[in-house]
Image (cartoon, rainbow, N blue to C red):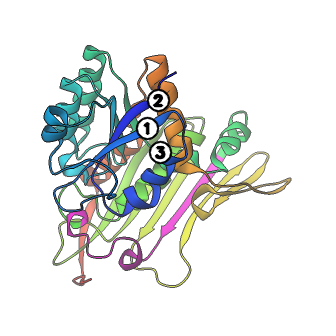
Amino acid sequence: MEPIRIAVVGVGKIARDQHLPAIDGNSAFSLAATVSPDDPGPCDLPHFARLEELLENGPAIDAVALCTPPQVRYELATIALKKGVHVFLEKPPGATLSEVVALRERAQKVGVTLFAAWHSRFAAGVAPARAWLSDRKVEKVSIVWREDVRVWHPGQAWIWEPGGLGVFDPGINALSIVTHILPRTVFLKTATLSLPENRAAPIAADLDMYDTGGASVHMDLDWRQTGPQSWDITVETDAGTLKLTNGGAVLTLPSGTEHNEDLEYPGLYSRFANLIRGGRSDVDIDPLRLVADAFLRGRRDAVEPFYD
């Protein structure tokens, strides 16, 4: 079977750290080109400043991985889908719910694969956590997702703009796990968003949610944490407590702790290849829906200005 010829659009930190190595390590794919108006990409590959240039004048491709800021993903995905090219959307899949729904409908009409890639769902502890919770009664959930924005997003101005999500850029990773492992649908009750006086997106957030069975789900997000970082989810059930730590990589059950090799992005690309080969799409909007609900219903508190 011939490999899927893929181009990476947006050659920033996440592309270089995760996407390029994952593609290189998956024989189902062949990296055909890169696209970026700024970064020249790997020196041994055809490179283009714009996706339109690649599609018109470059090597033939079957798929694109969009690793750009979310504010421009809709336009790029639309260009690719019009050409019958399969599309991998880095998280969050778009700047708005409406964009993602429209892309899902377009992909279905043209018969190509669209993949909203929630990478944290492929962390080592997530699948076994989902299986363990499937027949348990969830009583209470606590999410603590605190990190240092200066370490993980240095100088990335787009993340503070409308559509960039602010602290929900990492926070949506936690929501992607929670909406995947909990047996019942989660919905938002109240939220408080802390916005620096000089920024358009929150630096911290506190969310009170519930599942449809009445279990409380509380989320504490903060981008101002220094020192050790916190990416933890605790689920109290009628059979004991489940904990996911280190972003989902480490699972602790009443029976003990499991440490497995963390292969998030290789898992994503294996999933993408299987979707393409099977003629299917995977576009779950639940994590983005909860973020949209927080912006819709959340109270906004002004806090001190933030400077990189």
Q: Quote the CA–CA distance across marks 1 and 2.
A: 6 Å
State the residue position of label 2.
3
Q: Amino acid at mark 3?
A: Ile
Contact, CB < 8 Å: mark 1 with mark 2?
Answer: yes
State the residue position of label 1.
30
* Range covered by the magenta-colored residues: 139-159
Task: Please count the marks in the image.
Answer: 3
Q: Amino acid at mark 1?
A: Ser
Closer to the camera, 119 or 266? 266
Residue at (73% x, 33% y) in the render: 135
State the residue position of label 3.
23
Task: Give x and y (percent) for residue 147.
Answer: 46, 73
Label 1 element class: strand
Query: Which quarter of the rendered picture does the C terminus lie within?
Result: bottom left
**Image check: 43 left or right of 248?**
left
Q: Quote the CA–CA distance across marks 1 and 3.
A: 7 Å
Q: Is residue 209 visible?
A: no
- Compare marks 1 and 2 and give the one earlier in the sequence: 2
Task: Give x and y (percent) for residue 192.
Answer: 33, 64
Residue at (25% x, 82% y) in the render: 306
- Compare marks 3 and 2 and give the one earlier in the sequence: 2
Q: Is residue 200 above or below residue 123?
A: below
Task: Give x and y (percent) for residue 189.
Answer: 39, 49
